[in-house]
Image (spheres, helix red, strand yellow):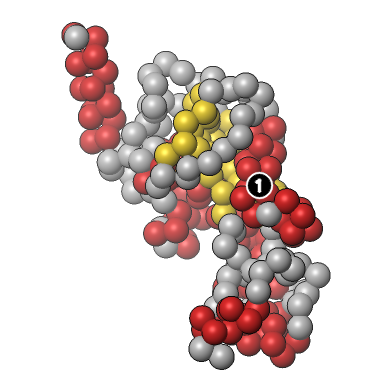
Amino acid sequence: MGQNRSIIVEQYRTIALTGMLKSFFKKGFLEAGCDEAGRGSLAGPVFAAAVILPQDFCLQGLTDSKILPGKKRILYREIIEKKAIAWGVGVAYENEIDTINIRNASILAMHRAMENLGKTPQVILVDGNFFKDFRKIPHHCFVKGDGRFLSIAAASVLAKTHRDEFMKNLHAKYPHYHWDRNKGYATKDHVQAIMEHGFSPFHRKTFHLKSLQLTLGF
């Protein structure tokens, strides 16, 4: 009972120090947080990142990358990549998404991120409710995990910033789709550009434009 109490106290101390995000799931284990970006996009690959942080890592304000301002995400990326024990990014491309579906492609990207870590974790913490075994390493899935654990939040920042950078570079070749602004998501200007210019080689072929037109009021 005393040991369990000390674990609970330590977890609450960790939450207080890091702005409500936990530094670890199990103290003393090498944990990799894992998250993806671009799952709901109409174009471009899905990116994933895996991050192993020191268990005393503290970065005030770090949370789910989707709610962070863009400049802060870039700043946090620099800090995370510098201070992480290890980090890796993985990508699953449009043809893979169309072949194995976005769910499996997201897992594939996460596995590739894990392969690029360069260090083997003892536990994997995954954002969301699905994952497939990776090298028999124990894993735990957490819905909205990027708002619960620092390592998952860090992975969400790396996945998002690396993907955003990729889409901005792609925008230079296909400027009429406005990927520098919408990053491939179904904004009105993006769908309008598809209707005017057709699909690019980087568009995913398994989404239905007609349903998008109805949704967006075209």
Q: Amino acid at mark 1?
A: Asn
**Which SS class for mark 1?**
helix
The image shows residue 39, relative to residue 171, as above or below, that is: above
Q: Is residue 136 left or right of residue 77?
A: right
For image coordinates 28% across by 41% down, the residue present is 20
Q: Quadrant of residue 176?
A: bottom right
* Image quarter in which the N terminus is found: top left
Up/down of 113 relative to 68, above or below:
above
Most extreme residue toward the top, as rendered?
2
Relative to 83, residue 62 above or below: below
Q: Residues within 10 Å of mark 1 (few under 14, many from 20)?
A: some
Residue located beneath label 1 in the image: 104
- The answer to which of 116 and 217 lies nearer the viewer is 217
Q: Residue at x 54, y 20 (%)?
A: 122
Asked whether residue 112 is in view, the answer is yes
Q: In which quarter of the view is residue 212 placed?
A: bottom right
Residue 112 vertical placement versus 4 (above, below): below
Residue at 47%, 36% in the rendered image: 141
